[in-house]
Image (cartoon, coloured by chain):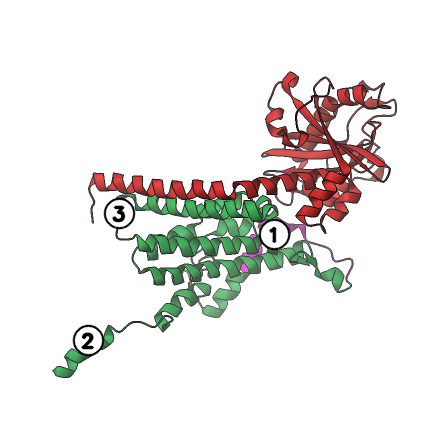
Chain colours: A red, B green
Amino acid sequence: MQQSNSYIIIFSLVLTVILGGLLSGVSQVLGPTQKKAIDLDTKKQILGAIPSEKDKIGDLTGEQVIDRYAEVIQSFVSDADGNLIEGVVAEDVNIEKNYKKPLAEKQFPIFKYSYGGEEAYILPTFGAGLWDAIWGFVAITPDFKQVKGISMAHRGETPGLGARITDPEVQGRFVDKMIVDASGNLVSVVMIKGEKNPVSKLGPNKVDGLAGATLTAVGVNNMLEAYLGFYKNYFDKNVKGANALTMNQ
Amino acid sequence: MSTETLEAPVAKQKEAMLSKRRRKFVTDPLSDDNPITIQVLGICSALAVTTQMQPTMVMAISVVFVMIFSNLTISLIRNLVPTRVRIIVQLAIVATLVTLVSEVLKAYAFDMYKELSVFIGLIITNCIVMGRLEAFALANKPYDSVLDGLGSGLGYSWIILAVAFFREIWGSGKVFGYPVFEAMGIENFSTNGLMVSPVGAFIVLGFIIWVQRTKSGYVEH
């Protein structure tokens, strides 16, 4: 059956309006629930940077995670020079959007963890993996020298290869690694090439790499190096005992 | 003469809800006309999402949902759809349903949404869906189309679940995330990295097709 052109155009228009209306309606209805889910996920990632918290998160319900977060996390926002910015909610700062801004306009959220005498600063980082964005939350000791833990996520790395940065075993490799060298220069933590390297090849600043996903590992290295450099100013200005560091690129 | 005229209305009697003909719509795609192993459609997602059983299960449910409702919708409007733009119309309806699934997952199962990410969106291009719309829903009544969608969806589901079972148990020593070997007291089970990569899916799928065709005697012409 051949329909006239005007029938086809009217049919297409009506179909478009119906389907478009349906989708925007659903998006409106589900929007608030989705925002909650995303917020909860971000909070899980922030808490997950602390190894002792990461072990517990799996057993908590969504509400318990939010309560726990409120109990142990304090948040601030800093600019590139390390000055605190007032009136901005750290949880609302979009790290990805900031990533693309020029340095002077960037805002850096900082999450301070303190519980039972344990203190750490959880720093959001963002960068490029092999295929798409990768991001992470790295927990650093208040003296800005050692990694307490890290949680990482990605958008499109290869499952089984680069996507392993979300693997607890891989993230565990960063725990207690130093971000400064023996003379106190900031050198970040580097994933080396290849996997199952002998311990002798790994120093305080190096962790085992990802076999078959060297480019994702390079992305992680660049991300950490860049963001630790950004956050250094904040620590120099605001955190006691983190002074007298020099950047060694 | 009179008996013949009486027979006609009997033949037009309402068909049972689950008559033999209709049952075949559901059972045929499970083995004899399986979308993956016989028609070799939907291979892309069968390789991509089957590393673990849990996401595979979500994927399977999503595909069954999309198939049933796209078949139903297309069948309901089959006499209104202009032939010249029917592919676009099918695509628009499938895309809408897939977006619905994706939005619901994002709101209520965010972890799954993250894990499946692009593959939910790619249901749109799953050839099984378009294939059934073109081949069946455009020419059949709504109820039959729903059954057909259910059958093809289940045919797809059981294959990807079977592939996921073997890949998860060999690749990570788990079933639905539960470490079975550790539970049995086997501590040093060495996992096979090949099974985690898509190559593993090809191999498992190959074996399933081999076994199935040996049993059914099906030969490619």
Three-letter residue code for mark 2: Ala
Disc 1: which chain? B
Residue A119 against residue B106 in the figure, above or below: above
* Figure disc tally: 3
Element type at mark 3: helix
Residue B200 against residue B23 in the figure, above or below: above
Nearer the observer, A60 or A89: A89
Disc 2: which chain? B
Element type at mark 1: loop
Q: Residue furthest front?
A: A87
Nearer the observer, B85 or B205: B85
Apparent side of residue B43 relative to residue B148 in the rendered image (left or right): right
- Whether tag 2 and tag 1 are in contact, CB under 8 A, the answer is no
Apparent side of residue A60 relative to residue B139 in the rendered image (left or right): right
Question: What residue would you read off at disc 3?
Answer: B83
Three-letter residue code for mark 1: Thr
- The reply to whether residue A125 is in sight is yes
Query: What is the spatial separation of the Cα atoms under label 2 and label 1, in whole angstroms?
Result: 55 Å
Query: What is the spatial separation of the Cα atoms under label 1 and label 3, in whole angstroms?
Result: 40 Å
At x 78%, y 57%, the residue is B188
Question: Looking at the picture, how far across and down is residue B134, in whole percent?
Answer: 34, 52
Quarter of the figure with the C terminus of chain A: top right
Part of the protein shown in magenta: B186-207
Question: Looking at the picture, how far across and down is residue B94, in whole percent?
Answer: 41, 48
Question: What residue would you read off at disc 2?
Answer: B8
Question: What residue would you read off at disc 1?
Answer: B51
Residue A227 circle label: none
At x 80%, y 38%, the residue is A175
